[in-house]
Image (cartoon, coloured by chain):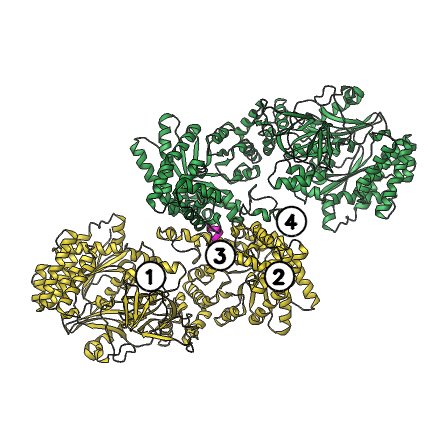
Chain colours: A green, B yellow
Amino acid sequence: MNKTVYYFGDQLTDGNAEMRNLLGGKGANLAEMCKIGLPVPHGFTISTEVCSYYFENDRKFPETLDQEINFYIKKIEDTSKMQFGSNISPLLLSVRSGSRASMPGMMDTILNLGLNDDAVIGLAKSTGNERFAFDSYRRFIQMYSDVVLEVDNSLFEDALEDMKIQNGFVEDTQLNTKHLKNLVSEFKGIVLNETSREFPEKPYDQLWKAISAVFSSWMNNRAITYRKLNNLPSSWGTAVNIQSMVFGNMGEDCATGVAFTRNPNNGKNVFYGEYLINAQGEDVVAGIRTPNSLTKDSDEHGLIDLSLETKMPKIYKQLDECRIILEKHYGDMQDIEFTIQKGKLFLLQTRNGKRTAEAAIKIAVDMVAEKKITIQQALMRVEPESLNQLLHPTLDENANSDFLLKGMPASPGAVSGKIVLESEEAVKLSAAGEKVILLRLETSPEDIGGMHAARGILTSRGGMTSHAAVVARGMGRACITGANELKIDQNNGIVYFDNRKFKSGTEITIDGSTGNVYLGVVPTVYPEMSSNFETLMKWADKERRLKIRANAETPSDAETAIKFGAEGIGLCRTEHMFFDEDRIIVMREMILSENINDRKKALDKLLPMQRNDFEELFKIMKGLPVTIRLLDPPLHEFLPNSEKELVSFSKNTGIDIEKVRTQSLRMREANPMLGHRGCRLAISYPEICEMQARAIIEAAVKVQRNIDDELKVEIMIPLASTSAEIDFCKDIINSVATSIIKENKINFNYLVGTMIELPRAALCAEEIASSADFFSFGTNDLTQTTLGISRDDIGTFLNRYLDEGIFSHDPFVSIDKEGVGSLVKLGAAKGRKKNKNLKLGICGEHGGDPDSIDFFEQVGLDYVSASPFRIPIARLAAAHSKIRRN
Amino acid sequence: MNKTVYYFGDQLTDGNAEMRNLLGGKGANLAEMCKIGLPVPHGFTISTEVCSYYFENDRKFPETLDQEINFYIKKIEDTSKMQFGSNISPLLLSVRSGSRASMPGMMDTILNLGLNDDAVIGLAKSTGNERFAFDSYRRFIQMYSDVVLEVDNSLFEDALEDMKIQNGFVEDTQLNTKHLKNLVSEFKGIVLNETSREFPEKPYDQLWKAISAVFSSWMNNRAITYRKLNNLPSSWGTAVNIQSMVFGNMGEDCATGVAFTRNPNNGKNVFYGEYLINAQGEDVVAGIRTPNSLTKDSDEHGLIDLSLETKMPKIYKQLDECRIILEKHYGDMQDIEFTIQKGKLFLLQTRNGKRTAEAAIKIAVDMVAEKKITIQQALMRVEPESLNQLLHPTLDENANSDFLLKGMPASPGAVSGKIVLESEEAVKLSAAGEKVILLRLETSPEDIGGMHAARGILTSRGGMTSHAAVVARGMGRACITGANELKIDQNNGIVYFDNRKFKSGTEITIDGSTGNVYLGVVPTVYPEMSSNFETLMKWADKERRLKIRANAETPSDAETAIKFGAEGIGLCRTEHMFFDEDRIIVMREMILSENINDRKKALDKLLPMQRNDFEELFKIMKGLPVTIRLLDPPLHEFLPNSEKELVSFSKNTGIDIEKVRTQSLRMREANPMLGHRGCRLAISYPEICEMQARAIIEAAVKVQRNIDDELKVEIMIPLASTSAEIDFCKDIINSVATSIIKENKINFNYLVGTMIELPRAALCAEEIASSADFFSFGTNDLTQTTLGISRDDIGTFLNRYLDEGIFSHDPFVSIDKEGVGSLVKLGAAKGRKKNKNLKLGICGEHGGDPDSIDFFEQVGLDYVSASPFRIPIARLAAAHSKIRRN
């Protein structure tokens, strides 16, 4: 085993910010801050390698760890003139996790470690503050028992609450030394009762068990869930940071807080944060007490008199200097934890701060203006997926709304949903397709699943940096925190907004950008994009190589797509045009035709409808390419499903109901996904293909007469696996087109290409490229066939596969690079080999997924096609991918 | 254009037997016979290249053809001292098709070409036989009008029949010159009436139109159907053979016939054939008159006095000499056409004779003994697929049977089915799953589809070499011809066997090996294999590299497999073991379990049943490998389907019927083929995998105690696409196995491998090979996923795809080499790259298909697994494939 422990302190700091893989983010930055001279309590980091060793060796430690830890504790003792476990001047330690990527609140922390019945006397003596000593002691017992001994935390909470009620207290700070001493013995009683053992008194015992507990927390359920949601590998492991304690709870000249170097909500370049006087750090983060603002002119916190700037101006100034130093040093907005112990400032952590998409964009654009970063860096600072937040709707200002109450605007977005009071319930209802808003007193890491399932989160406690706020922003969920006028009666499933009483299940609307909560569903509108957004998008457009198109059929979709910057339509699904009430009847007549003449009659009725659709699309898209896919789904999908529909259809058309029923049954398929669909329809019923080709070309010729831009029409043949299929359809299309073009005496060009959505098509792409002008990889169906998984049926086993780590992600969300991806790669290479000008794109759901886009950039496709609301995400992701490869 | 025409005659023959691609089989062999000095009427062949040119150039001929034809006709005129169209000594020609592969009766022939009102006078003069001249003329007009002018043939037939009835004649030969002259003018009247033009008189007009008609017949429907059934490409084209006519119908010293150098039915080394005195060749082949035997001691024809050997002993001797020469020259059994004109013998054709599988085997084995061919050649002489005939059942001699009548045993096999009287009906009923026997007066090339659809064919006319007999033997259909006591009343759908009257639809049994027909379904038994068969199989086993295994679950399947030479079980589908009445109930209890404990209880009941199954299999297979696949189909397949089943199941188990109904509905999948099945079941319900592993290993350990051979147990994980899935299942299997093996204190080894049946598995085979001891390519599912075609739904468009030439064959019957095959190749290569000892096999239906086996040999798989009755076919196909590559 290599070196297992890395020291940080005034002299001889082993680590630095680059060593985040080995030391975790927290450890690496503590070392870095020491190096640049910022005030950090001394300590050391046990590396992530030890964590891996621990899990690979049946939860045993490497042999050398023991002596290394002893050596560095001695060093802290020497520097601090305190002794671990001493009853005169005891050294207390914090033991904190810290992994490569920030996983806020997911893993365990233990503070005040080293206290026992002797040391607490020493602490009282050395600080001259007996109340503080016992306050620390009762906190330590509770925290240690919770984390290490796994005693139910609510037992301690209840005991504390009882003590306060007995004495008529509201705040913990009202408890005096005597109360705290009693609490310590009560707590020890709870431990004995629950574990049948005395609370451990030996400091080194405490330390080793704490280290084990922190490592073990890497594998607790909420950490596993978090990693799964964020696609982090479990192989990384966590480091453990052991550090000399500093105390924000030693009196009124003490405090603790968290600060962001800029506003993480909107990105403004102001110091932003919260603190609590006479408290320990966990109090702020956990949102148990509502904290005060750092600065006088904060937007969110009304009580200016209580700001740090007012109460401790010198310390505030020192902290503000640290802010400047850190942001300059790291070149990014920082999220800082600090503690003030008897008027002395200590920094306990710095990291790149989580932020909303709006903030990320503003910070990135501002920092370019401030010459702190390059345009490329700025682009990389904004997560493509996070743009989803900006594309979220806001409340319609003109709508009537029934205001309920106001909380803190913790994460933007306006959403409506039914009230649920428990995370489990939220997961269940959401899985059943319900839209829900999760209401909690405060959230804890246990709520992570429920927060993910909910459309929005509303808490009655906590501030802008509470667990709920941080996690919701990270997830892009709307969130309001600290809504004090919200009361929750969990047991009876009732909530009170101010004094108005509602049952859980009631629909409400929350606006995470204002903190307002309304009764019922308030209509929403889509926001105008900020100029920063436009700037960033322009930068992205300049950087990216991949073209971005949209999947769109309706004029409204096409207009949205254009607004969001689409450079064409990559997939127009003509079958979506047949589901209108008046059209579906004609479609059904066509399907139920008993001979080709009847079928042609029905198709003649459909022709003008389709032609009209295409005209509108071509007018909107002008000179941008429009890829139109011929009819794809099996025909039985258009037939009436329910008895009611059947009766009504039969009445409307006069077609015998028994005939329709029989035909529907006859057409039913064992595996429709692998059935009579795609170009197989065009080959069985060439007249359908003919009608569609006619509608497309006639529409195009008509529109072309009236515009200058040259229309770019691309006709796409679905589900082909041989060039013969394409040739068959192409012959029909070309013959129709030639006659129309001739008739109209116009010069008009169009392309005929194919979807590559079957493994055979990719494998035989060379042959297919000889018949096709372009390929569009249909990665939805290609995923279904390559993995042999029906998209409609994956629900039966996907969760199990994710839980067991068999799949790292849902292959329909992000492309399976090794399997499906290798076919895309092969298909692209073979296609280009045959025809080096072959246009290559993709039009599955993966076209809007940043991770998949990165893959398509690597493969060298020409464009991706995504749903209109994901166009900006795709544009930015394409830029990221290009920059990464520069 | 190259040379278009190739001459054959006494001097200067251009072609030879090797030139079959250019000259067609007939043309090449006519040239070859000329070269070796056999008596062949002079002529020339227009090459197949001209046919291709003809179809590629809108049915026009190459420019040089005209002068080449004129040149060679002149040459025939010069040699024969006759002139084309002369009224003194007219040259008559036969114009016959002839493609690379024999397509008997599929394309058109015109005889006596060159006759007109002048030439017929010349013919009468030069032959001194006016009756003959007009007989030839009326035949020519009918044939030419039918083939070239497309006049309905029945009009001529009816006129001929009327003429006979008016005169009270039975045979055509009873008509005298006057009758024939009248017939000629009647025929010309029909032509004028039907085509509004006079019958063409100019010989060269007749010739060019005849050439066009023969080329065009390459693309007629029956030729297209034949090529499709026999997998022949349409690009080959046909040649046209133009040859000086010789006449078998000039009088009683004339005759025509067909002969096989050995008996094509049983392979005996005897001269075998039929002839008609005073007739043209078509009369024999079309089966219009029942011909007589060549030899005195023929088995099949009773009238020894009428044999050629008796009637024309000299000519017979000369013919027998030709037989010896031809068989020696070609080294294979020949099918010869001959004509005797005024006591002079002419050979009109020779080709390798079609034969039954039994005959093919005997001839091949005999010719090795006669040192005419090598063992490898002998093996190549037997089509693997044809062995199917031998594996056909024969009638159970002990069964009671109701004898109807006896015909000629034209093609072996005993089959039962419903009587149908029309080919179309046969196709329709067979497609609907009915077993049918086609009954016809005589068959014609139009019946090809119906003959293929039927299980057997019975005709009242024709002999052993009639159309029906030849085609049926080629197809491996049972066939009886010349059943004179059969009368068919087509219009009323009634048949008479002797005097017993039956409706169409009545079930009968025909035995093509004896010629016997029985009423109803007569039970059949499987035949013992002949010693020639065993000899050939032993030779095949020596030659082949591929191992052959069987797909088998039951002891009876396994025993059959062993009998047919299987070298192991390649696929034991455990789910087939769950469908027994008593087991399905327990299976359903298992599926409907609401918790793991209930499920385990049900599995505990299934365990001893499964274990017992495996014990039996292991005992039968002894030291041969047995590959057992874990449960594969989606569980809902085991649930009750019908309301009746539901009620009965609910009653038997006491499980609430609503619960079963709801659960069935809940489990229904959109695409079960791509659903919750295969290893996905083992991962969702590890306890099922555990039970199966336990059953396998416990059974193996028990059987191993009692036998010396080391059991070779291979456990196969279905539908995997990642190594993680295999590892998951393997962990369960290994842990179960380890404990059983330990408990039993026995040394026992087994393999754990996987099916490669998803494209991803093949693409990621390297990764998968790190977890698997063997791969078995499941090409059924691999075809479904690679082509995106559900096997259950392909029927909706397969015929259309075959008709349009988009598919050359059903990809579930013969592997799609370019698509599915490329994945097999890739998977095999990647797997072997990771693990060079990886065992590779296939277990789809393709394992028994000769064409697919040839591919698997090329790819280098270790074994194929086929259904038991296809094992001999696979053994021979594997030998063929190896020989081809030596």
Could you say which disc has been placed on residue B779 in the image?
3
Q: Please name whichever residue, A647 or A175, is drawn nearer the observer in this view of the structure.
A: A647
The mark that comes first in sequence, 2 or 1, is 1
Where residue B190 sits: x, y (%)? 15, 56
Give the amino acid type for the residue marked by disc 4 in the picture.
Answer: Glu
- Left or right placement of residue A745 versus residue A871 in this view: left
Q: Secondary structure at mark 4?
A: loop
Tell me the amino acid under the disc marked 3: Thr
Going from the N terminus, do you reach mark 3 or mark 1 first? 1
Pointers 3 and 2 within a single chain: yes
Same chain, labels 3 and 4: no
Measure the alpha-carbon separation of dots 1 and 4: 56 Å
Amino acid type indicated by mark 1:
Gly
Q: Which residue is mark 2?
A: B692
In this view, B525 is above or below A663: below
Q: Main secondary structure of the magenta part?
A: helix
Q: Which mark is residue A804?
A: 4
Q: Tell me where the magenta segment starts and ends, as one range.
A: B778-787
